């Protein structure tokens, strides 16, 4: 539901309801081997091939009402899309164990490569309240393809220098190339007209990093302290020769942008209590779709576009932890402050008359909201978190967590102050119960798990994220010798409440929306363990993402 405004005064209303039906098909095969060259040298080779395809059918019902909430017209938007992908991975890992216990060297080479294709058809019909045709049917269709190659090399060395000290160091180099082609057309009297949505996009990313960690631990006191990385991202809209991207650090005087220290100090107090202070600094780079100026029109009332001027954001985290063990469990209390300079955050505004004219053939609503991304000045989070792990008897365990946070967002764009602040909280409960008995019974080795999670509304620059609530439940039965087989029944979103949404409240519009990807679902799975359960080809694998 949206309320459109002009200088704060209501001009009209818009309601939209969307229903998606999706189909997904995945196939993959993975194989590998460990080669034990000697008792100190191990080489691991693994290969993965995967492919899949997606289908999506969406129907949008739209209502356009005037300032008196009287229906002026309504629309039906139907879209049909298909996509497929091939994704392959080759990994080579080498590990050397030195004669000294704990000293080791590892090296990884990881190569990902693949392609993707997609196509869609969008049909728009608009009617007067009495059902007569309001305007001519609008049809948009598109197709696209992309190819990507990612190469990562990483080497790590660990050396326990003495009984109390340890040194860890390593290097990492990541290279990513990505190219995509996207063509969009509108039907006009049977003729295909190419839309300005079409683009030819090239992307190159390189990140080089090195780290050094020194750890000290003696009796009740320990600390560990630094890593640094440098990189560049280059993007180009090939058809227009428009280039954009960034280096970090941009200059020698900005060397701090490439340093990411972490510092941990731990002090035991008696046998059951422990205090820890830690500081970490991280970088989060923009995703490629956040930078790509391509315009996504799948939702004609909420279109999306990347911002090529985005820069990496940083996270400075300070934490003070207190941990206490007691008979039957553990209590962890955390007091934290997280400062997030240049926080990448979403920004929304109604499209201009010029933008509407440019996209008119794509059946965009004249009051459509353009969603993009900006760098906020900073986002600060002040909070406290409590976690209790408690065991009741031998078979029942309960873990409640509570997080209370005060968030301040400082952001300005084009002279408009988007700053906001407010309190939010999250509560989560994980409970496990397992029946174990020496007597033979159909209920023996039967386990239950219940997870309850609630997140309160939280402020964002132009409004707030809505609350979320979900409950998951699972039962697992283990059987056969050494519990080699198991049968699991799980219900995801037990009460069918999982959804997320946003409320925007600005001078130009008020919008209340929510989405959900999956409704409640039921799963039954069977597993059987055989061979060496400790075998794992591709040892030393690391995640590839933008959070460092």
Image (cartoon, rainbow, N blue to C red):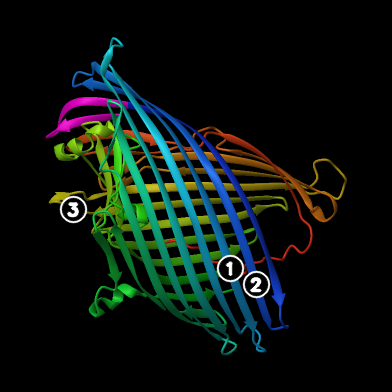
Q: Count all numbered tags in the image, as a single digit.
A: 3
Identify the mark at residue 91; answer none if there is no mark.
Answer: 1
Q: Mark 3 or 2 closer to N-term?
A: 2
User: Can residue 317 be seen in the rendering of this structure?
Assistant: no
Check disc 1 and report its element: helix, strand or loop.
strand
Q: Which residue is mark 2?
A: 44
Q: Quadrant of residue 273?
A: bottom right
Q: Is residue 359 left or right of residue 225?
A: left
**Can residue 11 be found in the magenta stretch?**
yes
**Can residue 422 be found in the magenta stretch?**
no
Q: Quadrant of the N terminus?
A: top left
Q: Which residue is mark 3?
A: 412
Q: CA distance from mark 2 to mark 1?
A: 8 Å
Image coordinates for residue 335, horizontal then vertical, percent: 41, 62
Q: Is residue 432 above or below residue 60?
A: below
Identify the mark at residue 164; answer none if there is no mark.
Answer: none
Q: 19 or 313, which is in the foreground? A: 19
Q: Is residue 449 left or right of residue 140?
A: right
Q: Main secondary structure of the magenta part?
A: strand
Q: Mark 1 or 3 closer to N-term?
A: 1
Q: Is residue 191 above or below residue 294?
A: above
Q: CA distance from mark 1 to mark 3?
A: 45 Å
In the image, the segment drawn in magenta is 1-15
Image coordinates for residue 336, horizontal then vertical, percent: 39, 62
How crowded pointer 1 is (Cα within 10 Å; few <14, some 14-19, many 20+) is rated as many
């Amino acid at each position: 539901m949206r309320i459109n405004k002009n200088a704060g005064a209501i001009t009209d209303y818009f309601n939209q309801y969307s229903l998606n039906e999706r189909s997904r098909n995945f196939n993959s095969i993975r194989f590998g081997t460990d080669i034990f060259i000697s008792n100190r040298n191990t080489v691991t080779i693994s290969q993965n091939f995967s492919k899949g395809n997606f289908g999506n059918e969406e129907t949008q019902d739209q209502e356009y009402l005037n300032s008196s909430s009287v229906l002026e017209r309504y629309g039906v938007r139907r879209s049909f899309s298909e996509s497929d992908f091939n994704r392959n991975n080759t990994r080579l890992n080498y590990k050397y164990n030195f004669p000294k216990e704990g000293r080791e060297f590892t090296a990884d080479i990881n190569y990902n490569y693949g392609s993707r294709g997609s196509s869609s058809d969008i049909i728009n019909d608009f009617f007067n309240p009495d059902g007569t045709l309001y305007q001519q049917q609008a049809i948009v269709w598109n197709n696209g393809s992309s190819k990507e190659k990612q190469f990562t090399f990483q080497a790590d060395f660990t050396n326990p220098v003495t009984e109390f000290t340890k040194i860890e160091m390593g290097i990492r180099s990541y290279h990513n190339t990505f190219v995509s082609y996207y063509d969009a057309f509108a039907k006009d009297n049977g003729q295909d007209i190419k839309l300005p949505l079409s683009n030819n996009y090239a992307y190159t990313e390189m990140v080089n990093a090195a780290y050094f960690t020194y750890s000290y631990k003696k009796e009740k006191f320990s600390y560990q302290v630094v890593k640094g990385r440098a990189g560049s991202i280059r993007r180009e809209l090939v058809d227009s020769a428009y280039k954009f991207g960034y280096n970090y650090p941009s200059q020698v005087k900005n060397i701090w942008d490439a340093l990411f220290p972490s510092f941990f100090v731990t002090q035991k107090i008696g046998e059951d209590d422990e205090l820890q202070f830690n500081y970490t600094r991280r970088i989060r780079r923009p995703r490629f779709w956040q930078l790509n100026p391509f315009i996504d029109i799948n939702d004609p009332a909420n279109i999306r576009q990347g911002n090529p001027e985005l820069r990496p954001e940083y996270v400075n985290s300070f934490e003070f932890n207190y941990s206490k063990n007691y008979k039957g469990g553990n209590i962890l209390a955390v007091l934290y402050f997280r400062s997030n300079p240049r926080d990448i955050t979403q920004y929304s505004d109604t499209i201009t008359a010029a933008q509407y004219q440019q996209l008119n053939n794509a059946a965009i609503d004249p009051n459509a909201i353009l969603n993009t991304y900006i760098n906020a000045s900073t986002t600060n989070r002040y909070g406290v978190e409590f976690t209790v792990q408690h065991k009741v008897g031998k078979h029942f365990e309960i873990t409640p967590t509570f997080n209370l946070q005060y968030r301040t967002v400082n952001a300005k764009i084009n002279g408009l102050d988007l700053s906001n602040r407010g309190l939010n909280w999250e509560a989560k409960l994980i409970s496990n119960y397992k029946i174990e008995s020496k007597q033979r019974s159909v209920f023996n080795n039967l386990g239950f798990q219940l997870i309850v999670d609630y997140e309160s509304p939280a402020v964002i620059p132009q409004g707030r994220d809505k609350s979320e609530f979900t409950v998951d439940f699972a039962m697992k039965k283990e059987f056969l010798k050494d519990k080699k087989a198991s049968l699991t029944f799980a219900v995801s979103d037990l009460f069918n409440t999982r959804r997320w949404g946003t409320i925007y409240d600005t001078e130009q519009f008020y919008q209340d929306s929510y989405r959900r990807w999956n409704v409640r679902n039921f799963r039954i799975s069977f597993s059987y363990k055989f061979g060496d359960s400790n075998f794992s080809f591709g040892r030393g694998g690391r995640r590839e993402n933008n959070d460092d």
